[in-house]
Amino acid sequence: MNLFQNVLLDIILILFPMILFLLYNAYNEVYDLKKSDLCLDFAIITSFYLVLTFKPDGYSYPYLMMNVPLALAYLKNKNKSILILSVLCFITLMGKYNIPAYYYIIEYTMLYILYKVMDKFTFVNLFITLNIFFYLLYEVLEKPYLFGNNSYIPNALTVLIPFIIVTYIIMFTFKKASTIITFHKDSKKTQDEKELRLSLFKITHEIKNPITVCKGYLDMFDFDDIKKSKKYIRIIKNEINRVLILLEDFLSINKIKIEKDIIDINLLLEEMTNSFLPILKEKNIDKIFNISKDELFINADYNRLNQVFINIMKNSIEAITDNGVICVFLKKNKDNIEIHIEDNGVGMDKEELKKIKEPFFTTKKQGSGLGVYLSRQIIEAHGGNIEYVSKKYIGTKTIVTLPYEEIGI
């Protein structure tokens, strides 16, 4: 084998166990599994064994290359591996050279002292330098007659240069791979934090709506008008139930879940629009509610759909400045139903309309930008979609499409 093949073989023999370890480490990071510190020790010692054992005939420098796994052990602060490999190197050198053992003790003691007092970058350079020095020293002590040979230096370079190249390549590769895994871990942590913040924003935004409604009706509460007060109590009770459902979502911090049941969509829209009548009257907003009294059954989550339509109605009311009109009506087709909620509010331009489905985007001064995002999640969980048609200073039409099939009751 030529020099290049020998260098390549060393890189493969040393890196193979380390790559397996890095893959194992990456897998555990991705799936948040518990990692064992012994795995890296095992990989480093395996690299040492491979580079010392699997060598072709005429391979002249495995005793220098066996220090590369030791350098990895130092780089990763693996004290057990450092101790084991130092002892193994000591035993190996004892079998190769007929020189006093204290030379080897001095070499590996010096390496450990430098490891303790130097930063990692400086230590790697000194590690290479010190190993080269002792390798040359052992060769001279073992074969002093070679010192004056003109071919000694070229032959020595064929040993030393591959050692330097392999050491730096292994260190660089392992460092970069570890950096990538660390980056992925940090990115995953950042994503988890982002999802947590998003969940907190979701719950804050959606709890605010029913609380605002409750406050509005409590402000209008009149103990002298028993009939109207009873109506307000029912509405307030429904809003409190909505809050409790939202709190359950907060506890799970998970994707919104829906619990489908057979519901009358016309009844849902009627009750929803009726709950807004006092607010519409107070704000002088005209209403056109074309909702049939006939029963129209679909398989859906009543509370979730109610949450969506309340959010749309609330946005429409807040978008209206004066001479307001809100229309609510339903269209039934063969395979789906469409709920239209239209207003003549401030509307949105093309850029705002493009961003309307993005979380955190809002056109309101005190909005969180999550109402539309949540509504879309709920409707898509039902197998439907939500569409917005709007023009600046003219108004907005929200179209909620839900799947429909005949349900026998």
Image (cartoon, helix red, strand yellow):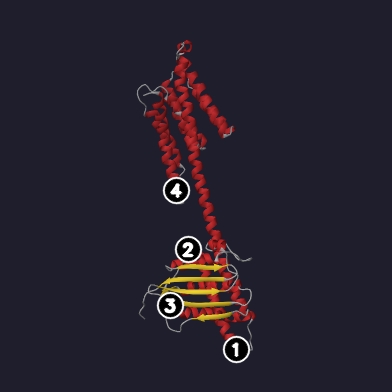
Please, what is the three-letter code of the amino acid marked with disc 3? Ile
Q: Nearer the viewer, residue 59 or 313?
A: 313
Label 2, residues with CA under 10 Å away: few <14, some 14-19, many ≥20: few
Q: Secondary structure at mark 2?
A: loop
Q: Which is more N-terminal, label 2 or label 1?
A: 1
Distance between mark 1 and mark 2 Cα atoms: 41 Å
Label 4, residues with CA under 10 Å away: few <14, some 14-19, many ≥20: some
Label 3, residues with CA under 10 Å away: few <14, some 14-19, many ≥20: some
Q: Which is more N-terminal, label 4 or label 1?
A: 4
> Where in the figure is residue 296, as x and y percent of width and height?
42, 79
- Whether 57 is drawn above or below 247: the answer is above
Q: Is residue 148 left or right of residue 121?
A: left
Tell me the number on the disc at residue 255: 2
Question: Which is in the foreground here, disc 2 or disc 3?
Answer: 3
Q: Which is more N-terminal, label 4 or label 2?
A: 4
> Where in the figure is residue 327, as x and y percent of width and height?
53, 77
Distance between mark 1 and mark 3 Cα atoms: 30 Å
Tell me the number on the disc at residue 263: 3
Q: Is residue 24 left or right of residue 212?
A: left
Q: Nearer the viewer, residue 260 or 240?
A: 260
Question: Disc 4 vs disc 3: Cβ atoms closer than 8 Å?
Answer: no
Q: Which is more N-terminal, label 3 or label 2?
A: 2
Quadrant of the image containing the C terminus: bottom left
Q: Nearer the viewer, residue 281 or 259?
A: 281
Please, what is the three-letter code of the amino acid marked with disc 1? Ile
Please, what is the three-letter code of the amino acid marked with disc 4? Asn
Question: Which is in the foreground here, disc 1 or disc 3?
Answer: 3
Judging by the rendered image, the residue that carries numbered circle 1 is 226
Residue 62: tell me if it is visible.
yes
